[in-house]
Image (cartoon, rainbow, N blue to C red):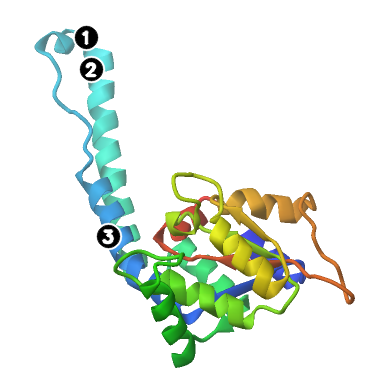
Amino acid sequence: MRKLAVLIEKEKVTLHVTDQVVDEFRRNRNAKLNDAIKKFKSDKLNDQFPQLCKDYDEPYEQMREAIRLYNEAKGLLLRRLTEDFGKEKLKADAVIKELFDKAKKIVASQALITKAFWRHQRRNPPGKKDSLGDAINWECLLEHVEDGQDLHLIAEDVDYRMEGSDEEFSPFLEREWATKKHGMVRYYTKPWVQVHRWRYGAAQTERTNSGTRQTARHASTAASFSASQSL
């Protein structure tokens, strides 16, 4: 994700972030990271050996010592991790903060929330049965992204996909963007794939003053937060 921040600085990519995305990230961060820490804490090395292993003094003692060192290092790691988690000092926190700071902020007005509500009532994508979040984000993009721009949407959320597909973008949303914004939608489920393409120019779609400039929207859900740790 740091690579994406560099591309934004160089004005090769415009990142649009809604206040809904920021709120979702803040809501999900603690729950997802707490789950990850709990799982790591509960995972234990098996320190039980068959009796016959004790006849092999050197490797047996080496394994016992390795387990002791592992548990000692794990305890230290957990203490530091828990402390940084509580203070929001994780590397991923810094990266996400940088992206949010560099992004173009979009505030969902009451009018846009109303549009999202009626989109949801009509069962039009994107969105889940019990949530307006994705609908709010989409209405914000339709309202605030300049006409004629291509949208590079990176989201692991199935709500943007064609029904029954793991990769294909929703034809309904694709048609809506083309009709209302006169641009194309390029959809990616893995952020690092497209960031790599942007960085090395394999997917340049910039058309300067007379045309379209590349636009990106990163759906900063818990999944994307996890992805940021590996970039």
Which residue lies most toward the bottom here?
A: 110
Looking at the image, residue 79 lies above or below residue 55: below
Kind of residue sitting beneath label 1: Tyr
Q: Residue at x 28, y 22 (%)?
A: 62
Query: Looking at the picture, how far across and down is residue 125, in whole percent?
Result: 46, 65
Looking at the image, residue 55 lies above or below residue 145: above
Q: Residues within 10 Å of mark 2 (few under 14, many from 20)?
A: some
The residue beneath circle 2 is 60
Q: Residues within 10 Å of mark 1 (few under 14, many from 20)?
A: few
Q: Please identify, in this view, whether the residue under mark 2 or under mark 3 is nearer the observer.
A: 3
Q: CA distance from mark 1 to mark 2?
A: 6 Å
The residue beneath circle 1 is 56
Kind of residue sitting beneath label 3: Asn
Q: Residue at x 51, y 58 (%)?
A: 155
46 sits to left or right of 194: left
Query: Looking at the picture, how far across and down is residue 224, in whole percent?
Result: 47, 58
Task: Give the number of the disc on residue 109.
Answer: none
Answer whether residue 1 is visible to the viewer in this image. Answer: no
Q: CA distance from mark 2 to mark 3?
A: 35 Å
Kind of residue sitting beneath label 2: Tyr
The residue beneath circle 3 is 34
Q: Can you tell which quarter of the image residue 1 is in?
A: bottom right
Q: Nearer the viewer, residue 70 or 197?
A: 197
Q: CA distance from mark 3 to mark 1?
A: 41 Å
Answer whether residue 144 is visible to the viewer in this image. Answer: yes
Q: Nearer the viewer, residue 197 or 181?
A: 181
Please, what secondary structure does the residue beneath circle 2 have?
helix
